[in-house]
Amino acid sequence: MNTSQNTTEKRFQRIPMREQDPSERSGNFNEVPFGYSEEEAVAEAQRCLKCKKPLCVQGCPVNVKIPEFIGLIAEGKFAEAAQKLKETNALPAICGRVCPQEEQCESKCILGKKGDPVAVGNLERFAADWERQHGEVTIPKKKLPNGKKVAVIGSGPAGLTCAGELVKDGFDVTIFEALHEPGGVLVYGIPEFRLPKQIVRQEINYLEKLGVRIEKNFIVGKTATIDDLLNEEGFCAVFVGSGAGLPSFMNIKGENLIGVYSANEYLTRSNLMKAFQNNAHTPIMKGKRVVTVGGGNVAMDSARTALRLGAEKSMIVYRRSETEMPARKAEVHHAKEEGIEFHLLCNPVEIEGNEDGFVQNIKCIKMELGEPDNSGRRSPKPVAGSEFDLDCDVVIIAIGNKPNPLIPSSTPQLKVSKWGTIEADESNGKTSMKKVYAGGDIVTGAATVILAMGAGKIAAKSIIEEL
Amino acid sequence: MAKIIRKEKLSELVWRFRLDAPRIARKRKAGQFIILRPSNDTERIPLTIANADEAQGWIEIIFQVVGRTTLILSELSEGESVLDLAGPLGKPTHVEKFGKCLCIGGGVGVAPLYPIVCALKNAGNEITTIIGSRTKELLILHDEMLEKSDRVLVTTDDGSMGAKGFVSDVFNDLQNRGEHFDTAFVIGPVIMMKVTTSLTVKAGITTYASLNPIMIDGTGMCGGCRVTVGGKTRFACVDGPEFDASGIDWDEMIKRLNSYRAFESKAQKSHVCKMEGVR
């Protein structure tokens, strides 16, 4: 009796992933979770009910064959599990780490009705890491080259996924990347402690092995336009996955003081330019008291980076309550564990500085929640007379990004929305311009890695059908 | 990678590099810049394209050694390559037949002024160029400017060449003589641009200045290069680098340029020391 009860309980209890201790990790940039051991992975995989009609697959934007790969892990066939993943997802080691599984596959898991859903993300990460660590990365079967050239603009999640799908189908694929390092937001945005760059590098190497060419330092819209690529350089199609790289500011007084960063700049200095390393040559202001404005994953990444760079106090200022925070629950939890101070329901009104132009404090006003707005979230309203100051020497603005205008402005035929996003059919990635497809944040506005990957995949499918 | 096909010392701290960059040479227009990174572990720095030849596929950059990255760049030899080169970036200079144009350059700012002078000349403008530097030895592109301008006025702080004083003094003289100009372009150290543009704007001349704030990506992604123009925040990389000088918040710009001064001077000193140790 007892034993069966235990088994039932176990069925509903997720194997936790071991993590670095919060007090230790807040002082280093190493990855926070350690990943599953083989035993832990098998035990977690054995919890899967192998549903006949797996709802988890429907919850995944790229329809990963979830019960199949988990079944292989349960049998101890780890390399096969990784290969199964790669049939539908070119970047499993990345998705296993940064996908919001709790809102997608895991939210649909039947086990979730009575207990913890299967840890799909943890298992995905395990299989991909196992394959990489055991040097058994296999190249899937490719179709024979079809001689057709496709240009992919941007090497973030949308572009990498699109390129991976196309090259497997025999296309001659070139990715054009504006920066000196491919990976887009995976490299400049997401910090080392959440996504080690070594992993991104290896996923990109894998695509290069498949035959994808990557042209770095190439800014489409400037170095060459989309028209040049199509009309002069022999590309049959172009996929635009240039992302949401234009930071929003609040337009309040003092925003150009020294020590005020966009999250993009702060994270780019730390991640892409390696300012987080001790012997780094790229300067970054290592504030003692850092205020990050915003409630998304980027805000959590910024605040936690500031802590690791030596801040005595790293604070989040967010205008709504924790319920409305767009960041993943796990990230908010990690941030709290590490000692990030949350100032909820308050909004900056002004940043004040000293005579040399360096930030000294941020003036905030308390907010209260009113009626739900267009996004369905209750909209915050300022409470009159409730202003207060937070002393700080660095302010990081992490309130979102607008689409980068370089491509729309150099391609007048391309229809854009009033927000500056490229208009594309979600079901096939087609834009208003013939042979031009788009997906990811440049179409949706800032969203998630996996949604961008889903869009890259859909566009690739549509390119394969059309050409 | 972009190969250095010619390397030339223009003055004590100023270098001219000719880089193999056919794509940039084809697309670039006056006023645009590139971002380069000489080697791993150096900064991405913006530099104006000083000259280019589409047929031969090269561009030229002129830079002054001001910190660690420019020092490392200056130590590369002909035949070697800069690791990363991207461009052309920024909006091109708005060029049309304005009539009488005044082009004012100070120090190494004479370099980015040169392509603008060329473009204005090609558009049929009458060009008065004022160039200045601290001493005769530091004056660059004098011959090139003579060739493209209708008139070149030189000034040095110490009077070793041309009139003794600043470019703003030369402008004052022209104004006192009752000369009139339709448009002015001013490029140089920020303090020089602040002083000079205040005079030209006051004289009723539509004036443009080219700004060189701290930048990382050069494509609008980081927002580090923001400047206040006409009360609005603009990104120099995508909205500029040239702006109507009458609305530029110069004091804010000067402060922002000093963001990392402590860090930079430390970095440069340590690099020089190490290099000296090697030699």
Image (spheres, rainbow, N blue to C red):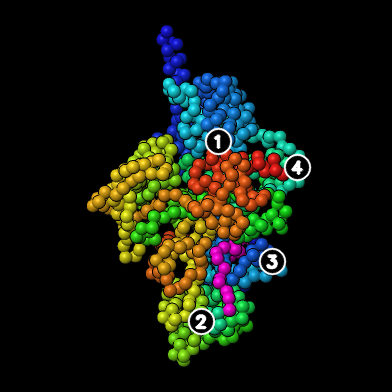
Q: Are marks 2 and 4 on the same chain?
A: no
- Report crowding for label 2: few under 14, some 14 to 19, many 20 or more residues within 10 A (C-alpha): few
Question: Of B251 and B166, which appears nearest the observer?
Answer: B251
Q: Is residue A78 magenta?
A: no
Residue at 64% x, 34% y: name it: A137
Q: Are marks 2 and 3 on the same chain?
A: yes
Q: Are marks 1 and 3 in contact (CB under 8 Å)?
A: no
**Which quadrant holds the C terminus of chain B?**
bottom right
User: Which residues are the magenta region?
Assistant: B73-97
Local SS, label 3: loop
Residue carrying label 3: B57
Residue carrying label 4: A145
What chain does mark 1 sit on? A
The disc label shown at residue B182, or none: 2
- Say what amino acid the circle numbered 4 marks: Pro
What chain does mark 4 sit on? A
**Which quadrant holds the N terminus of chain B?**
bottom right
Q: Determine the image quadrant of residue A308.
A: top left
The disc label shown at residue A61, or none: 1
Q: Are marks 3 and 4 on the same chain?
A: no
> Is B224 located above or below residue A204 in the figure?
below
- Say what amino acid the circle numbered 1 marks: Pro
Q: Are marks 2 and 3 in contact (CB under 8 Å)?
A: no
> Is A190 located above or below residue B128 in the figure?
above
